Amino acid sequence: HLSGTARFQSSTCMGNWAEERELRRTILKDMLAKKTTGTLRLDAYHQRMSMALAEVELTRVADDPNVHFGDVLQLVHLET
C-alpha cells in the first residue's frame, strides 16, 4: 500500500459520471416501460413457450395410420 495515493472504489465517480448515471437511468426506465407493456424479450419467450406447451385436442383427417396435412399430432421424446 502506497501512502499518499488515491484510493478508488466501485462507487468512485470518474470520467463523465453524470452522463453514465443518466444512461443507467434511461436504460432502467426503458426496461420498466417494456415490463409494464409486456414487450420484454422474456415475456415474448414465455408467451411462445406457453403456446407451444398448451394442450390441444389431437385430431385425424383420415382413419388410416398415415399422417396427413391438417392432422393435429403430438411429438414425444422418449428420454424426456
Image (cartoon, rainbow, N blue to C red):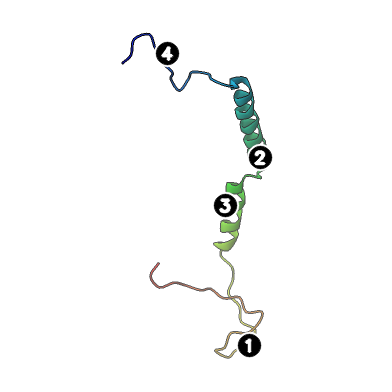
Q: Position of residue 48 (x, y in %)?
A: 60, 57
Question: Are circles 3 and 1 on residues that touch, CB within 8 Å?
Answer: no
User: What is the spatial separation of the Cα atoms under label 2 and label 1, in whole angstroms?
Assistant: 46 Å
Question: Residue 46 bears which disc, if any?
Answer: 3
- The image quarter containing residue 21 is top right
- Give x and y (percent) for residue 67: 58, 84
Tell me which amino acid carries mark 2: Lys
| Foreground label between 2 and 1 | 2
Residue 5 in the image: above or below residue 58: above
> Which label is found at residue 62?
1
Residue under circle 2? 34
Considering only order in the chain, which callout, 4 or 3, is on the residue closer to the N terminus? Answer: 4
Which of the numbered marks, if any, corresponds to residue 6? 4
Whether pointer 4 and pointer 1 mark residues with C-beta atoms closer than 8 Å, the reply is no
Q: Residue furthest left?
A: 1
Query: Which three-letter amino acid code belongs to the residue tagged 1?
Result: Ala
- Hey, what amino acid is under mark 3? His
Distance (Cα) linking label 3 and label 4: 48 Å
User: Which three-letter amino acid code belongs to the residue tagged 4?
Assistant: Ala
Q: Residue at x 38, y 8 (%)?
A: 4
